């Protein structure tokens, strides 16, 4: 057998650098023997010894990659075995965590009296940081699972029983009835608020909404709610959401949200006598906090409703 040369020594040494000490001697001997056998085969075929050795090492390739093959060590960050679990979890967290963080930061900054620029800057900074942190920590967890050989959360083999149910189209009969019932409850609540009111103690009742909204602002609200009802019936009749219907829904949401927020900012949405009667001592502070929360809820519902309609229209298309 031809004796190994300096190139072979260097190659074996490079390949064994990442191998645990207890396995190094056996794997080094096995690798040297394999290289020597291949060199001998080339020499017997008439190839010069120096050229044969070089060609054998070229065919073996990068020594670190060869060592990883010996140890069955993956050469990727998140391999195919874990990729789908990693990607599904990451998408789910990206869809939930940044939105919740942005809402919480914006609400907290608003309650603290920050300016609009400060709120926007804080929200953008937090959202970017949350996206990066979620990606880093989720990836780190899956890297640890992969390197330690743990099974995924759901190691069972895939079967057709695991196929997801189709997502709701939002155009079914139940969806239409739910929308109409919700709108009817809203109309009833507005009428109850004005004509009956809410108990505030001492047998007295007061409306929560500013009585000055009657009749024209409330009439406009009823028109918007009627348009929502017509939209729900139209979506059901068409059997699906379309981009045009989603755009119409967004317009209705924007009109409602802008009007409500404008009235709220001007102190004309909530009855100015309601909180001083219910909580005389801290009326101004409570009214301010609840007004901010109410504004966020109005804006959040309008945005969510618009995005949801466009997503349903996209799926239907």
Image (tube, rainbow, N blue to C red):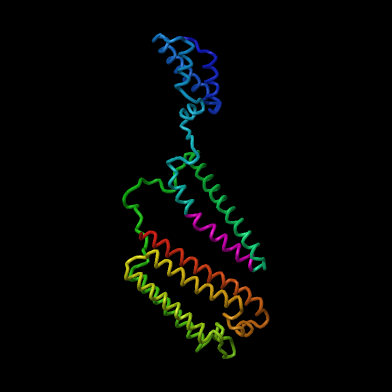
Residue span colored magenta: 92-110
Q: Compared to 56, does 271 lie above or below?
A: below
Q: Compared to 183, does 88 lie above or below?
A: above
* Residue at image location 39% in from the left, 66% down from the top: 244
In the image, taking residue 252 as reference, residue 287 lies left or right, namely right
Report if residue 247 lies within the magenta region: no
Q: Give coordinates of residue 256: x percent, y percent.
A: 50, 74
In the image, taking residue 259 as reference, residue 312 lies left or right, namely left
Q: Give coordinates of residue 136: x percent, y percent.
A: 55, 47
Q: Give coordinates of residue 181: x percent, y percent.
A: 40, 77
Q: Which secondary structure dominates the residues rendered in magenta?
A: helix
In the image, taking residue 191 as reference, residue 288 lies left or right, namely right
Q: Quadrant of residue 308?
A: bottom left
How many numbered marks appear? 0
Q: Compared to 303, does 227 lie above or below?
A: below
Q: Quick one: quadrant of the N terminus?
A: top left
* Residue at image location 67% in from the left, 79% down from the top: 282
Q: Give coordinates of residue 168: x percent, y percent.
A: 37, 63
Foreground residue, 307 or 81? 307
Q: Quick one: quadrant of the C terminus?
A: bottom left
Foreground residue, 220 or 182? 220
Report if residue 93 lies within the magenta region: yes
Foreground residue, 130 or 264? 264
* Residue at image location 53% in from the left, 71% down from the top: 298
Q: Which residue sits furthest bottom? A: 203
């Amino acid at each position: 057998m031809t004796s190994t040369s300096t190139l072979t020594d260097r190659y074996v040494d490079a390949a064994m650098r990442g191998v645990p000490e207890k396995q190094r001697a056996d794997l080094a001997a096995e690798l040297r023997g394999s290289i020597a056998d291949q060199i001998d085969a080339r020499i017997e075929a008439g190839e010069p010894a120096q050229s044969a050795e070089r060609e054998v090492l070229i065919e073996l390739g990068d020594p670190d990659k060869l060592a990883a093959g010996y140890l069955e060590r993956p050469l990727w960050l998140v391999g195919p075995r874990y990729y789908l679990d990693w990607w599904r979890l990451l998408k789910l967290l990206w869809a939930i965590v940044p939105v919740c963080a942005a809402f919480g930061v914006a609400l907290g900054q608003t309650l603290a009296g920050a300016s609009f620029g400060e709120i926007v800057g804080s929200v953008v900074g937090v959202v970017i940081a949350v996206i990066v942190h979620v990606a880093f920590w989720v990836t780190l967890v899956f890297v640890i699972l992969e390197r330690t050989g743990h099974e995924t959360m759901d190691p069972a083999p895939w079967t057709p029983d695991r196929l997801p149910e189709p997502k709701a189209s939002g155009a079914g009969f139940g969806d239409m009835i739910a929308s109409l019932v919700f709108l009817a409850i809203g109309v009833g609540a507005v009428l109850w608020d004005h004509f009956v009111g809410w108990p505030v103690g001492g047998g007295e009742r007061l409306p929560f909404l500013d009585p000055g909204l009657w009749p024209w602002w409330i009439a406009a609200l009823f028109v918007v709610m009627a348009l929502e009802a017509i939209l729900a019936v139209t979506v059901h009749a068409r059997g699906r959401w379309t981009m045009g219907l989603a755009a119409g829904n967004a317009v209705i949401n924007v009109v409602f949200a802008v009007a409500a927020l404008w009235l709220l900012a001007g102190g004309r949405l909530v009855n100015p006598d309601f909180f001083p009667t219910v909580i005389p001592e801290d009326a101004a502070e409570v009214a301010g906090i609840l007004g901010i929360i109410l504004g966020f809820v109005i804006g959040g519902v309008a945005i969510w409703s618009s995005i949801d309609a466009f997503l349903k229209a996209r799926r239907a298309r």
